[in-house]
Structure formats: C-alpha cells, structure tokens
Amino acid sequence: MIVETVIRTVCEHTGTLRHELLSPMSGTAVLRARDLAVLLLRERTGASSTKLGAWLKRDHTSILVRLRKARERLQHDDRFRADYDAIATAIDGRPPVVIDVATVTAPPRQAMARPALVHHDTDTPEIRRAREAFADADRQYLAALHRVHPELAP
C-alpha cells in the first residue's frame, strides 16, 4: 500500500522512528519528517486532509498547516527539496517532475461558443471539430490549473 511505503521510506531516509512520526512529538526532526510524509502522501494519493489525518493520527487542520509549511519549505529550503527528491525517487523509482509554480501561469481560456445541441443524424463534421476543439481547450485549461493549484486536482 502506498501509505505504508511513503511512511516507511520517509522514516528510513530521515532516521525518524515510525512511532515518532505518528506521535504528538513536535521536535524539528520529527516535524520535518512529518512534512515530507504529508506532502508525499497528498501528491501520491490525492487524499483529503481528513484522510491524511487519519493515516498520520492528526486532525485535518494540522494536516493543512503541515501541507502549507511543506510547500513553503519545498520552495525555499534546499535541504528539504533534496530530501523530498531523494524520497520521491526511492518511492517512484524515478526523479520527480519539478514545476516552479511561481513562474507557471494558466493559458488564457479561449472564448469558444459551445456548438448547438443537434440530433446525431444531423451532426456535421464542422460541429464535431468544434466539439473536439472545445474539449481540447478545456483539457489544457484544467491541466494548467492543476499544475498551479494541485490541491484542486481530482
């Protein structure tokens, strides 16, 4: 199970014991390991803060705080980034994709009229192309949005 894999790998990499990671302890090393675990679990499972809290024996607001802190550390703390990259590589077997959210912007959404609903017998090639173009524009917009705001991803 991915939850166990992430927790085990974070503990091995940081030297934190599993019971410390899941305990109320709040030392610097434990918080650092917990931040790594929360971030990696969120990215790999897409689980809600409530679900993450259940796995890590925390309430959902504590998870939200740890996620915010972890994302800040990821942007500004080179050692944290290196630990994150090493653990992600160990879990996935490949280096993580790094996206600097500060420089990524969503492309402007193109104004396209939705094709009129028509009976399938009168569906023309032009209408099919318009539907495909609209669907493609929606996919591009959502992909850019999820890169900038991963918490909105399904």
Image (spheres, rainbow, N blue to C red):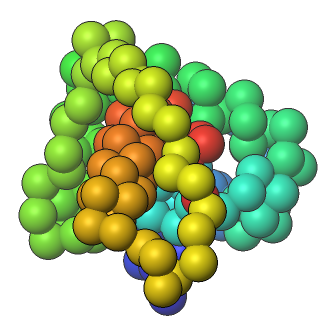
Residue in view at x 45 percent, y 63 percent: 44
Residue 60 drawn at (x, y percent): 84, 47
Residue 120 drawn at (x, y percent): 51, 82
Q: Is residue 114 above or below residue 46?
A: above
Q: Is residue 9 above or below residue 136?
A: below
Image side of residue 58 versus residue 147, left or right: right
Residue in view at x 58 percent, y 24 percent: 69
Q: Is residue 21 above or below residue 36?
A: below
Q: Is residue 16 visible?
A: no
Q: Is residue 92 visible?
A: yes
Identify which residue, 145 or 34, lies in the foreground.
Answer: 145
Identify which residue, 128 or 152, lies in the foreground.
Answer: 128
Quarter of the figure with the C terminus: bottom right
Image side of residue 4 versus residue 110, left or right: right
Task: Give the farthest residue toward the front.
Answer: 122
Question: In the rendered image, which quarter is residue 80 located in?
Answer: top left
